[in-house]
Image (cartoon, helix red, strand yellow):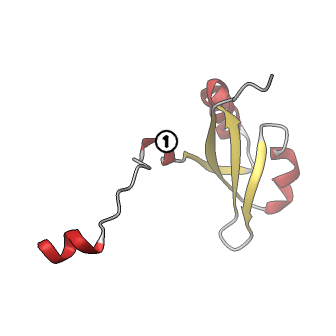
Amino acid sequence: MYKKVERQALYVWVYSLKWRKKLQRYGTIYYTSPKMKYVMLYVNSEKVSEVRKELISKNYVKRVALAHRKELDEHFVLKSKNTEEED
């Protein structure tokens, strides 16, 4: 049976994108921005702090930031046309 694994996105800014291949060992690369020189990397939630510390210590990494998507409320309510007319 498949077990869902919680994942966290990390944004890793690098000096050069030639280091992209090295970042694959830390997690799944979801997106790479050649213009801004960052890589969006998905990592298992329980390993985020370890991976972040390790990445910061690398000399090819400028900075590492966590994505705040988990903190956002993703439950949206749309107003219908009837409620807009009543207001």
The residue most toward the bottom is 85
Using the image, determine if residue 16 lies above or below residue 72. below
Using the image, determine if residue 54 lies above or below residue 84. above
Q: Residue at x 21, y 68 (%)?
A: 83
As rendered, which of 70 and 12 lies closer to the eye?
70
Q: Quadrant of the N terminus?
A: top right
Q: Position of residue 15 (x, y in %)?
A: 72, 60
Residue 27 lies in quadrant: top right
Q: Residue at x 60, y 49 (%)?
A: 63
Q: How many marks?
A: 1
Q: Residue at x 78, y 26 (%)?
A: 2
Q: Residue at x 73, y 59 (%)?
A: 31
Residue receiving disc 1 = 70
The residue most toward the left is 87
Helix, strand, or loop for circle 1?
Answer: helix
- Dot 1: few (<14), some (14–19), or many (≥20) neighbours within 10 Å? few
The residue most toward the front is 82
Q: Is residue 38 left or right of residue 1?
A: left
Q: Position of residue 70 (x, y in %)?
A: 49, 42
In the image, what residue type sits under mark 1?
Lys
As rendered, which of 13 and 25 lies closer to the eye?
25
